[in-house]
């Protein structure tokens, strides 16, 4: 149980284009999903917290107009990197929290490696 | 600024030895503590979590928590080459947002 998928697993795009990344909880309902970014040899940095049916909460320094997050259902959240630039190249990882009371763990998706040329 | 500190390593141990990984955190209100393992190029996978002071054992892994010292550790017994990875300590503050703050991770190398 507690499987989280991401799609695509990797993407290469040209500078200025937009890229959408999907995060799905496959066998549980996730009230809350989290989006992280990880640069090489760095730790995970939380970008935003996504709650089903409401606006995402962004961390300080993360541009909400550049990183659009939609959490339309209890099993799907999407991150759209708009007008991507080479400095946006990174490993993007989502996680999901099981909505059942008492489950505090976050289960991570496999990640999406974005390369912007 | 809530911080989670780990030695970056690398920590190198021979196969069969005990690996000891340490983590300190700054927020005294922290309630839950997690250890994740991350292989190169992969996403983190949860090893174990601990909420209460003391030790918690799961197979070859033991997590230790000392809230008074704001310190959490992970011991890996009988280390195997397959344990070679980066180990991330994560801390959840109190409240309902369930956000985790991650340390930078410790790179562990287990030598055959």
Image (cartoon, coloured by chain):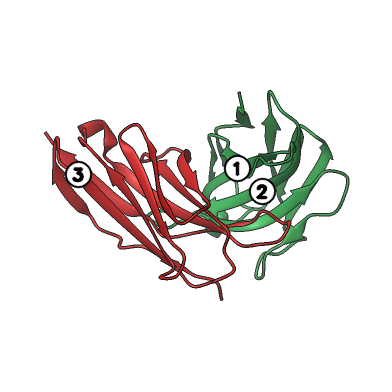
Which residue position holds label 1?
A: A106
- Image side of residue B50 versus residue B64, left or right: right
Instruction: Locate residue B61, reporting x and y percent.
Output: 34, 39
Tag 2 secondary structure: strand
The chain coloured green is A
Instruction: Locate residue B49, reporting x and y percent.
Output: 49, 45
| Residue at (51, 50) in percent of width and height | A90
Position of B94 relative to B43 (above/below): below
Instruction: Locate residue A78, reporting x and y percent.
Output: 74, 41
Quadrant location of the N terminus of chain A in the rendered image: top right
Discs 3 and 2 carry the same chain letter: no
Q: CA distance from mark 3 to mark 1?
A: 27 Å
Instruction: Locate residue B53, reporting x and y percent.
Output: 46, 57
Q: Could you say which disc has been placed on residue A34 in the image? A: 2
Which residue position holds label 3?
A: B18
**Chain of residue at mark 1:** A
| Residue at (79, 55) in percent of width and height | A56
């Amino acid at each position: 149980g507690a499987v989280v998928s991401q799609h695509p697993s990797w993407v290469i795009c040209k500078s200025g284009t937009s890229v959408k990344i999907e995060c799905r909880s496959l066998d549980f309902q996730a009230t809350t999903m989290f989006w992280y970014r990880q640069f090489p040899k760095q730790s995970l940095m939380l970008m935003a917290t996504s709650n089903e049916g409401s606006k995402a909460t962004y961390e300080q320094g993360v541009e909400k107009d550049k990183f659009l997050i939609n959490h339309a259902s209890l099993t799907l959240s999407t991150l759209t990197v708009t007008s991507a630039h080479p400095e946006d190249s990174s490993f993007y990882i989502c996680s999901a929290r099981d909505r059942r009371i008492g489950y505090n763990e976050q289960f991570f998706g496999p990640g999406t490696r974005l390369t912007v040329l | 600024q809530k911080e989670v500190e780990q030695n970056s390593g690398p920590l190198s141990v021979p196969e069969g030895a005990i690996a000891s990984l340490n983590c300190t955190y700054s927020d005294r209100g922290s309630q839950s503590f997690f250890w994740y393992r991350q292989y190169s190029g992969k996403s983190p996978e949860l090893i174990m979590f601990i909420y209460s002071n003391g030790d918690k054992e799961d197979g070859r892994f033991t997590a230790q928590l000392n809230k008074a010292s704001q310190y959490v550790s992970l011991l890996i017994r009988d280390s195997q080459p397959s344990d070679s990875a980066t180990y991330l300590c994560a801390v959840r503050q109190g409240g309902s947002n369930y956000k985790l703050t991650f340390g930078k991770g410790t790179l562990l190398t287990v030598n055959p």
